[in-house]
Amino acid sequence: MKKNLLPPPVGAALWLLAGTMPIDAIAQSGGLFLPENGGPSNGTAQAGSAALARDAETAWLNPAGMTRLESPEAVISLMPFRLGFQFNPSAATTINGSNGADQGDWGPAAATFIAVPVSERVALGFSLTSPAGLIIDPADDWVGGSWTTKSSLMAVNLEPSVGVRLNDQWSIGAGLDVQYLTFEQELRVPLVGQIVGIDGDSWNVGASVGLLWEPLETTRLGLRYRSPVEHELSGDLTLIGTRQVSTSFLMPMSATLSGYHELSDRVALLADVGWSNWQAFDRNVLTLDNSGLTTELARNYQDVCNFALGAHFRPAARWLLMVGAGYTSSAVADADRTPDLPADQQVRGSVGVEYEINARWRIGANYTYLWLGENQIDQTRVLGARLAGDYDAFAHIIGAYGSVRF
């Protein structure tokens, strides 16, 4: 880490904050950059996400798929989720304090998807999603309080999109991602003996493109690309008065290849292979006010790969059962993981059920259990203070949605 000589106590606080702001928390896990949105794709752990193209959710998952819809449609979903983080300190820890109890909490999420065919070849869409979220709230006497005593983060994405059918087999699509990121965090600064609070937000814009190939009536392949979105975050640092701080954070580019194949009228198989360019986020720089005083923390991130397999089963004409499992690799090695987000690789298992009330209305529900890896922590702070141990980390994700065709 490279750091400038800043006047204490502001220099000490800025140095600590450079490694603990929750914007880094997303990056470290590959992370809580979660694909779940409460909609139908949750039922298969997102397997087949860019190829399924069966309802308005495709406005977000792959706008090229909107060309398959025969009528305007809207899908609205709700997704309460429960993050669980339980720290288990090892004998190597040299800081006094408790294990922080359960540091996770319940959080709300929701999404809206709209797709409107305007001709035989063109469809327009809109989606409102929350692609990243974090809530960590350990006990006040937590041993890792100099990293974080409380963190919350939320990203909201608004995307108008368009899909165009080129011929009987090929369609293309594109969307404009208007993204809002907000965060709040508190931590204990040992050198000045008090709690520091920081908060901030940012708007920025990215884009997505999609491709859909339908070689057979029963088979589809979809490709989705999302551009990076770089946020310029600015907020208030509360420490003996209020000072402004700023930093940048890159939501990385990603690509997903999906497949969908019907084995029969009742059974279909779905698959996803994806990649996210977290290696592009190689450092974190914080700037204090407009003074030019900065501190920089190198990040040894690595690209993330994800895989998912799923299936659809139709036991009766109006019922659809879904099941899936997925894996996402870690974006950070054990030596670089910090307690602001104790997440590692992701392993998820999902189930879902959907019922078609009539030709216009459908309802559905799904559940995902998400295991967040082994989460080894071994970090040293001011005056040689060492925090070492591991986490029991998981998430329960519940989705419920309704769909209407117009």
Image: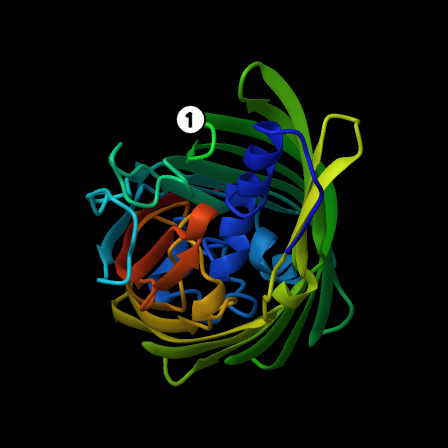
Query: How many discs appear?
Result: 1
Q: Nearer the viewer, residue 399 or 192?
A: 192
Residue 206 shows in the view: yes
Residue 65: x and y in percent read 61, 62
Q: Residue 369: where, in percent of width, then height?
A: 27, 60
The residue nearer to you, when weighing 102 against 404, is: 102
Residue at 32%, 76% (x, y): give it. 266
* Residue located beneath label 1 in the image: 195
Choose top left, top right, bottom left or bottom right for residue 216: bottom right
Q: Residues within 10 Å of mark 1 (few under 14, many from 20)?
A: some
Furthest-front residue in this view: 383
**Position of residue 268 in the picture relative to residue 102 (left or right):** right
Q: Which color scheme does this rendered protein use?
A: rainbow
Q: Is residue 390 left or right of residue 282?
A: left
Instruction: State left or right for residue 125 relative to residue 154.
Output: right
**Foreground: 317 or 166?**
166
User: What amino acid type is highlighted by mark number 1?
Assistant: Ile
Residue at point 29%, 53% (across, down): 94
Q: Is residue 143 above or below residue 353?
A: above
Q: Taking 280 as reference, is 135 left or right?
A: left
The residue at the point 45 percent across, 53 percent down is: 32
Q: Is residue 17 above or below residue 352?
A: above
The residue drawn where x is 56% and y is 77% is 220
> Is 201 rendered above or below residue 222?
above
Q: Quadrant of the N terminus?
A: bottom right
Residue 118 is at least partly visible in this image: no
Residue 283 is drawn in which quadrant? bottom right
Residue 345 at x, y percent in the picture: 40, 69
Task: State the SS at label 1.
Answer: strand
Residue 87 in the image: x percent, y percent? 25, 53
